[in-house]
Each structure stands twice: as structure tokens, then as C-alpha cells.
Amino acid sequence: MEVDKLDRMVKGWFIGDFDPSVLKTDQFEVAYHTHSAGEHHDIHYHKKSREYNLLVRGKMIINEQEFNAGDIFILEPYEVSEPTFLTDVELVVVRAPSVKDDKYIVGANT
């Protein structure tokens, strides 16, 4: 059995084509994210990957739509992600494929 720790990973990402990773693959990425109520989060999008999100705990608004625990939402390539965290939240995020440098911050040189 192999054992690792989430706090050793970068920003909750633990599977994908990056280091460290418990499974290195370019097929997909998996992360466990926590955000605090009212936390600022960069408005961003991806050009090559689709993002699958499971809201495990809490309440949030993304792109003017409210989501609650148990909701799943999918962001398509080029679809901008603009979240507002209404409560503390926990998310499981899967991106496919795992593409390095495929995060574009809105307002940055994209």
C-alpha cells in the first residue's frame, strides 16, 4: 500500500500530469478543493479541458447560477468560471484531459 498526504499536493490537485501526483497521467486531473465563504477566486477558463465539479459541501454561485451540496456542474472549454462562495465549500474537481498551463485568468495577458 502506498500512502501520501493531501497537504503535500499543490492546491489540492493529486492526480494528473504534474508533480507531485499520486497518479501521473495526461488523461485527467483530480483535486479536492476547499474555499471559505466570501473568498476571492480568480475568474478563469480553460482552452483545452472540460471541468467536472461536484459540490460536496456548502453553497456557491457560479456564472449566476446557485449550487448546493450534491450538485454537479460541468464547465466547457472557453467557458469562464466566475465563482462566489456563499458558505464554506468543499469541491471535487476533475479536468479532462490533463493539460499543463491550460488555465487562463480573465484580465491577465491571455
Image: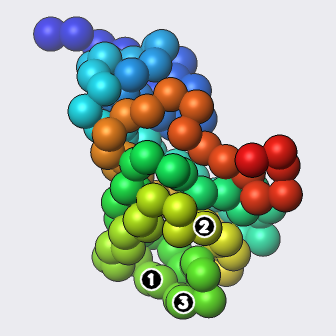
Q: Amino acid at mark 2?
A: Ser
User: Residue 84 in the image: x percent, y percent?
Assistant: 69, 75
Q: Residue at x 75, y 47 (%)?
A: 110
Going by the numbered disc 3, the residue's amino acid type is Gln
Q: Earlier in the sequence, mark 3 or mark 2?
A: 3
Query: Front-most of 25 and 7?
Result: 25
Residue 79 drawn at (x, y percent) = 53, 68
Is residue 28 shown left or right of residue 56? left
Residue ID for mark 1: 68
Residue at x 37% of width, y 34% of height: 98
Q: Nearer the viewer, mark 3 or mark 2?
A: 2
Q: Of the two numbered discs 2 and 1 on the same chain, state the one appearing first in sequence.
A: 1
| The quarter of the displayed image where residue 27 is located | top left
Badge 1 amino acid = Asn
Q: Do the residues bearing badges 3 and 2 touch, measured as CB atoms within 8 Å?
A: no
For residue 36, say whether it is visible: yes
The residue tagged with tag 2: helix, strand or loop? loop
Q: Which mark is residue 81?
A: 2
Q: Is residue 72 above or below residue 33?
A: below
- Asked if residue 41 can be seen in this view, the reply is no
Mark 2 vs mark 1: give the one in front.
2
Crowd around label 1: few <14 · some 14–19 · many ≥20 (10 Å) = some
Few, some or many residues within 10 Å of mark 2 (<14, 14–19, 20+): some
Q: CA distance from mark 3 to mark 1?
A: 10 Å
